[in-house]
Every structure is written in structure tokens, then in C-alpha cells.
Image: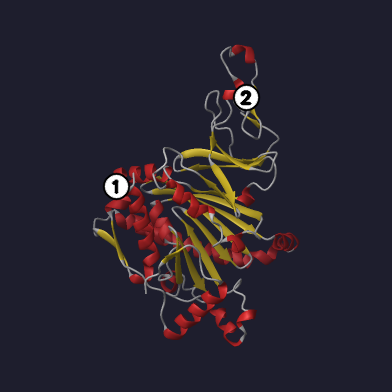
Amino acid sequence: MSTPTQTSVADDAEIVRRILAHIDAGTTDQGDDWREPVENYVNPIRFTAELETLRSYPSVYLPSAAIPSVGDHAERVTFGVPLFAVRDRDGRARVFRNACRHRGMALVEGPGCARALVCRYHGWTYRLDGSLSHVPHAEAFPDLNMPTRGLVEVDSREVDGLIVIGPLQSPARDADAAMAALTDGSPWRDKLLPFTRLVAVRPTLRAMNWKVLVEQFLEGYHIRSTHKDTFYPIQYDDLSVIEAFGPNTRITFPYQNIERLRDRPESAWNVSHRVTYVYHLFPNVMVATFPNQVLVVTIDPVDVDHTNVTIHAMVTPEVAEYMSANPEAADDPRSLLNAGGAEDNEMSEGVQRGLHAGANAFVEFGTHESAIGRFHAALDGRLACR
């Protein structure tokens, strides 16, 4: 069955009902199949067109938990553009282009906290709202108009645990609709907002096209083959629920313990340790729920064969306190997630190598992998709007 586009997602009870029905019938959600030309993964001209298109639309930049307090800042290169976010003295999250207005030095280099932003090259200093506050030997710049030489701000909004940025160049004609789809947090609000404590940030350069990396999150058809000793013993192979909301998608992957809910009243159903929700916030960010933690994964194209991926891991304050008192308690879940992630990346790197083999004119996605086809169709649609 094809999954219609909607503005929100089903509640947890409806998801449980759909999963149990699939278990009983031996089925899964289905949609349209898709064939993606190999050329679209390996052609530098196509990659450049994608990058230009991505810059013309809004996207999720960081989780709010990355900069929880006044003066906290973090940087990230987004679609080839160096940016950073900082929380100003009014508690507002702001995003700026990461360049000093003197000689263009990157102002923020990694996460930190500061009362002011000081360029370590020549000492030009900026307030947390981006305004220029101090220039050493200002007399040497007779034509400098300090009020006009603050940092260059990027349009941004903070909504339901995420910082969303506007287009980084001339906006596409449907950029406003894309922004609306990323700033209605109702689909993920209750799953993300309680997870306010950032416990890990893991940036990695991966040897794969950014679209190959996105694809690994969007189907469960591989679980038995790829994860036979990690996820398969606790989950199901090729069983997922797919929901589209705007250009975004939520994929639900159930754990086998969901069957324990069969004998309980629906009013007592709780899915927090019984499913993983993966929210694909188009085009390049995943929000994934796991028992006791949520991951926000940003996927940044570098070139046709490389992608920067950054994983932000967050927990609730209660879990953070427990982890602090019992550090060994988190070892097994982390080991399982890390092992499963390593398996996914190994497969994706193998796909990237195979794309250059000349064996295939296209990559084949079946009806059980329809969220991937939907991703490619949405990207094609945006490319057509350029």
C-alpha cells in the first residue's frame, strides 16, 4: 500500500496497531519502487547542481541541546558554507557565517562557551548578537564603520528542540513552504524535547556519497543480512511503518518486545523501549529515537565520494544523572548502537565502491524501500525548481 503524504504522523497507539497487524500478516508498509541512475551518485556536475539546490532551501542546522546556555557556540560546515550557532544574552539561538569581518578568519573553531567572540588572528571582538565591539588599533582603519561590520547573520528559527536555518543563497521559489515543513515540530516534539542533555558529538568523514548515507537510514530490508548479531536478534527483518509529512518521512522500526503489549489495554501502551522512530527531515538530517537517548544526525555533502556526518547524542536530565553515577550502565547500549552503525557504514562504503564498477546503469529500490524512492523524488523535484 502506498503511504499518502500528510501533515503529521500517527499517535503511538496507532503505530502499535499497525505493527501488530504486520506481524500477524507477515507484511510491511509498501510504496512505489524506484530506479535511481548511478550517474546521479558519481557525476561531479550533478553533485554541484545538488549542492547549489541544497543551499537554496532551509535545513536543520543543530539540535538546541548543542548550545543550551548563554555564550555556548558550535560550528558546522553546511553544504560547503562554514557557519556557527551561538546563544546570545537574551537566550536566542543565532546562526552566523563563520568568518571575521577583518580578514575572513574562521571565528569559531569547535564547540565552546564565551562571553564574547574574539578572532584569535588579530583580536577583533564581537558581542554574542554578532555586533562588532572592539578593534585593536582602530585608528589604523579610518574608513571602518563598526556598526555595519558585525558578523553576517543567517536567517534561523529555533523550534521544538532544533535550530533551522534559511537558504544560504538566493532562495528557491518554494523555500517558504520548505521552511514551514521544518518548523512545524508536532511530529517529533514529544520525542525530542525531553532530551536536553548533550552527552556526545561524533563528527566523521565517510567515504560515500551523501545520498548513499541518507539511504541507510530509510529501510529495514537489510536488518537480517547486515545486522544478524546486533539489531536482528531484538528487531524484525523487513518490517517498518512509513509515514510522510510534507517532504519529510518517519520510519518506525519495532523491537520484538512490542508483542508484550498484546495483552495490555491500549491505555497502558508505551513504545519508548519498543520502537525506534527515524525522522528524515529533508534533505539531510535524521532524528532517531532509541531507549534512553535520541540521536540527531547531520549529513553534509563534501564531494561525490565523501560526506561529513555528525552524530549528536542526547539524553534526559534523569538519564544524564544516572549515567554520571553509573558510567558502566551505558556501555552495552552504546556498544550495540556503535556496532550496528559500523555495519551500516561498511555496507554503504561498499555501495559507493560498487557505483564506480560500471556494472549498473541504475540502483534498484523495491516497494519495501519506498522511503528511499520518496527521498530521491523530492530531491529531483527541488532540482527541477532551480
Q: How far apart in space, not on screen, are marks 2 and 1 (Cα)?
A: 42 Å
Q: How many marks?
A: 2
**Taking 246 as reference, is 13 left or right?**
right
The tag on residue 124 is 2
- Amino acid carrying mark 2 in the image: Trp
Of residues 37 and 33, the one nearer the viewer is 33
Residue tagged 1:
43
Expressed as whole percent of the image width and height from the top left, the position of residue 334 reads 60, 63
- Residue ID at (62%, 40%): 86
Of residues 83 and 307, the one nearer the viewer is 83
Q: Residue furthest bottom?
A: 263
Q: Quadrant of the N terminus?
A: bottom left
- Residue ID at (61%, 28%): 119
- Amino acid carrying mark 1 in the image: Asn
The quarter of the displayed image where residue 200 is located? bottom right
The quarter of the displayed image where residue 92 is located? top right
Q: Secondary structure at mark 1?
A: loop
Regarding residue 320, the answer to whether it shows in the image is yes
Q: Residue furthest right?
A: 325
User: Contact (CB < 8 A) between labels 2 and 1?
Assistant: no
Q: Label 1: how many residues lie within 10 Å, few (<14), some (14-19) or many (20+)?
A: few
**Taking 348 as reference, is 356 left or right?**
left
- Residue ID at (44%, 59%): 246
Of labels 2 and 1, earlier in sequence is 1
Q: Secondary structure at mark 2?
A: loop
**Taking 132 as reference, is 277 left or right?**
left
Q: Is residue 310 above or below residue 117?
A: below
Expressed as whole percent of the image width and height from the top left, the position of residue 16 reads 53, 77
The tag on residue 196 is none
Residue depth check, mark 2 versus mark 1: number of the one nearer the observer: 2
